[in-house]
Amino acid sequence: MNIAKATVPASLLTARWWWAAASVSSLAFAAGFFLNAASRPAQEAPGFWGAGIALVGLGLIIGYCTFRLWLGQLAGRTSLSWCGIIVGIPLLTRGVRVGIFGALLLVGVLLLWSPGTVRYFAPQAKAARAKRRASRIAEKSRNQR
């Protein structure tokens, strides 16, 4: 079966770069926390180290999922959507400084679910639904025996 590769919509191109920038900025913020921890008294440093480690983890997760998005995989879009929602919404309640980063993550989620991007991933989503449905039917038939 010969399936032509769909052209990448502008919203997906923007989302790819948006999430790559989010990954890099998360790692840059982590570096700032590590540098700040080194210049603080010993009693204050653990909080900065913890925040830096959390931001490194976030940056690496976003980077990996962005790589998968760049490859055109539906799993990249799904993972970035969940990451953006789970991290972005709580950051909105933490004040202006981190609230801006949370809002930027949520804008990235909106880019992933724009109409052009949804159309681009529609064949993969349809195939994934069919695969899950087939496995549910097979499981149901095994349980009825």
Image (cartoon, grey):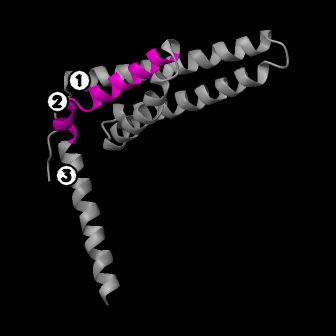
Report the number of numbered marks.
Answer: 3
Q: CA distance from mark 2 to mark 3?
A: 16 Å
| Amino acid type, callout 1 | Ser
Asked if one can make out residue 67 in the rendered structure from this viewpoint, the answer is no
Q: Residue furthest top?
A: 39
Q: Nearer the viewer, residue 84 or 123?
A: 84
- Residue ID at (37%, 20%): 18
Kind of element beneath mark 1: helix
Dot 2 corresponds to which residue?
116
Kind of element beneath mark 2: helix
- Residue ID at (16%, 35%): 6
- Residue ID at (26%, 26%): 12
Dot 3 corresponds to which residue?
126
Dot 1 corresponds to which residue?
11
User: Which span is picked out in magenta?
Assistant: 98-121
Is 7 left, or right, of 66 in this rendering? left
| Amino acid type, callout 3 | Lys
Mark before the other along the chain sequence, 2 or 1: 1
Q: Magenta segment: does it hold 114?
A: yes
Residue 139 vs 19, above or below: the answer is: below
Q: Tell me the crowding category of disc 2: few under 14, some 14 to 19, or many 20 or more residues within 10 angstroms, Cα based.
A: some
Mark 2 touches mark 1? (CB < 8 Å)? yes
Q: CA distance from mark 2 to mark 1?
A: 6 Å
Q: Position of residue 131 (x, y in %)?
A: 26, 61
